[in-house]
Every structure is written in C-alpha cells, then in structure tokens.
Image (cartoon, rainbow, N blue to C red):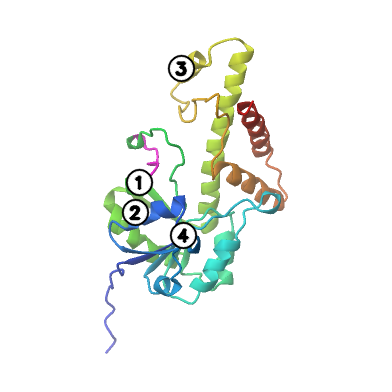
Amino acid sequence: MRDEVRFVPPSPSVAIIGCGYGGSACARYFSSAYHIVRYDPAKGYRDRTAVLRTALAVVAVPTPEGARGHASLATVEEVLGWLQRAKMPVVLKSTVPPGTTNALAARFQMKDRLCFSPEFIGEGNYFVPYWRGYPHPTDMRQHEFFIFGGTEAATARVIPYFEKISGPFVRYLTCDAAAAELAKYAVNTWLATQVTYWNELYDLANVFEVPYRTVRELVLCDKRVSPAHSLVYAHARGFGGKCLPKDTRALEAAARQKGYLPRLLAAVRSANRRFRKASLQ
C-alpha cells in the first residue's frame, strides 16, 4: 500500500540574510506570521546554524556597483555557497542582472529551491498614496502584487509563505527568473528616467523664463502624465540614493556585455550627473 502524501504546513521560522534597508522591510513583513532568524555579521547576527534550520531563507544582501558599473555579486555568491548545504527554499531579494538567478541556481544545484522576487520598497521620505496602486514605501503588507521568478517547483515552494501574510486580495505573479530580474531593473530605470525628464523640464522653464510650478500643473492636467517624481528640489537635483544610480548603470553594463548599447540609459546617467553637480553649486 502506497504511503499517503499529506500537506505539511510551512515551519514558523524564516531567515532574513542581510539586515539593511530591504532586509529590514522583509523582516517586518515576515515577523507578522513567522519567527525571524537574522543573519548579518556586520550588525552582530552571526549564527549560520540557526539559519540552516529555518524553513525559508530570504537573501537581501547588497549588490553594489562593481568594476565598470557591473553589479557586484560577491556577497550573494558567498551566501548561496553555504545555504547550498540546507534544503529550504531560498528567495533572492537582492537586485541582480538578468540571467543571474538561473546561473546561480545551476552553479549551486538549487534549480528547484532558488527563486528571485523583486522588492519595491522605496527610499523616499515623502508621502505616497499607496491606495492608488503605488507600492507602499515601507510596508510590504500593503503591496498589491508579488513577483516570483524561477522554476514552477521553486516558486510553488515559496509562495505559500507570502500567502499566509498577504492573503487572497493580492496577485502572486510567476515567470522566468530572468524576466523578473529585468522587470526590477526596468522599474528602477524608469523611475530614474522620470526624475531626469522633470529635471530637464525644470531647466527648460528657467531658459524660457516661466515658473516651473505653473508648467508642472499644466502638464499634469493630462492624466496620461504621472505626477510621480515631478517635484524638483533645487537643493537636491536629479536622482540619488542606494538603488537608482547603481541599478541604472548595472543594466547599462549588462546590456553592453551582451553587445547592445542602451543609449537612453547612458543619456539619463549623463544628464543626472549634470543635475547632481548643479545642486551642489
């Protein structure tokens, strides 16, 4: 007689690896339903053994700008190297170039364990009307969708942990990992492009000696134009922060590596350097 296959509910322990801005947001999210085990040696969390006993690992370590603008994957690779010994599913929240998750899954023999799930926690301190469809800037529980890139087996093992918290009124989108990775870069480079456009319009308003605020209000009468990033701060021109500069350059570098020159992204970065310099004068 064949053994009956029974559903085993997820364990209440989730590991958060990397306790920076994004990792802290993930910890707040999962702590509403699970016991959290943190790992970040720089912040005093060093117990790998406890991590290896958890049911789900969330990797949110930095991928800073490396040589020639490429995203540095050294910390991600180091973490996956020792997570390979465990059996739990792994969610990669760190922003990585398209093709990275598939390559790492093959390298570390984690094809049906590793998936990429981009995060949309913002860095700005200004008010965001999240009920209009904008991702909530600090609380993942308010997000209306989650993206999971990976094999069907890998995403199926991960999604139940999110469903337990977010419930039935959000969308759980699955796709190939490379599509999810490119989508994350696409969002950040689009935001960078929006900032750049409005900063250019700000300078054009000065050239034609008309009030920028008046022009902005007139433009926003057309509902096809989003008000996001339309405020230009004279003391802080262009885009900065942790993500937009490095991700814009990283996508440009990844495209160049494939033999394609993304001229628009190059122009956005060039214009942003000019705006940032102007705010320092």
Point out the residue furthest to the top here. 209
Residue 71: image x %, image y %?
62, 53
Q: Determine contact: label 4, label 3, CB under 8 Å.
A: no
Which badge, 2 or 3, is on the more N-terminal residue?
Answer: 2
Kind of residue at badge 3: Glu
Label 2, label 3: how many angstroms apart (C-alpha)? Answer: 37 Å
- Of the 4 image quadrants, the one containing the N terminus is bottom left
Lateral position of residue 54 relative to residue 195, left or right: left
Residue 258 shows up from this direction: no
Say which of marks 4 and 3 sits in front. 4
Q: Is residue 2 above or below residue 62?
A: below
Identity, as a three-letter code, of the amino acid under mark 4: Lys
Quick check: marks 1 and 2 in contact, CB under 8 Å?
yes
Alpha-carbon span between mark 1 and mark 2: 7 Å
Earlier sequence position, callout 3 versus callout 1: 1
Whether 112 is among the magenta residues is no
Task: Identify residue for label 3.
Answer: 217
Residue annotated with mark 1? 139
**Residue 207 in the figure: left or right of residue 163:** right
- Identify the secondary structure beneath mark 4: helix
Would you place residue 148 above or below residue 241 in this image?
below
For residue 29, the mark is 2
Q: Position of residue 92 (x, y in %)?
A: 48, 60
Specify start and end residues of the magenta stretch as a single range: 132-139
**Looking at this rendering, what residue extends furthest in the front direction?**
44
Q: Amino acid at mark 2?
A: Tyr
Q: Nearer the viewer, mark 2 or mark 4?
A: 4
Q: Amino acid at mark 1?
A: Asp
Residue that lies at the very extreme toward the right in this rendered image: 259
Using a 10 Å C-alpha cutoff, classify the residue at mark 3 as few (fewer than 14 neighbours), some (14 to 19) or many (20 or more): few
Label drawn at residue 43: 4
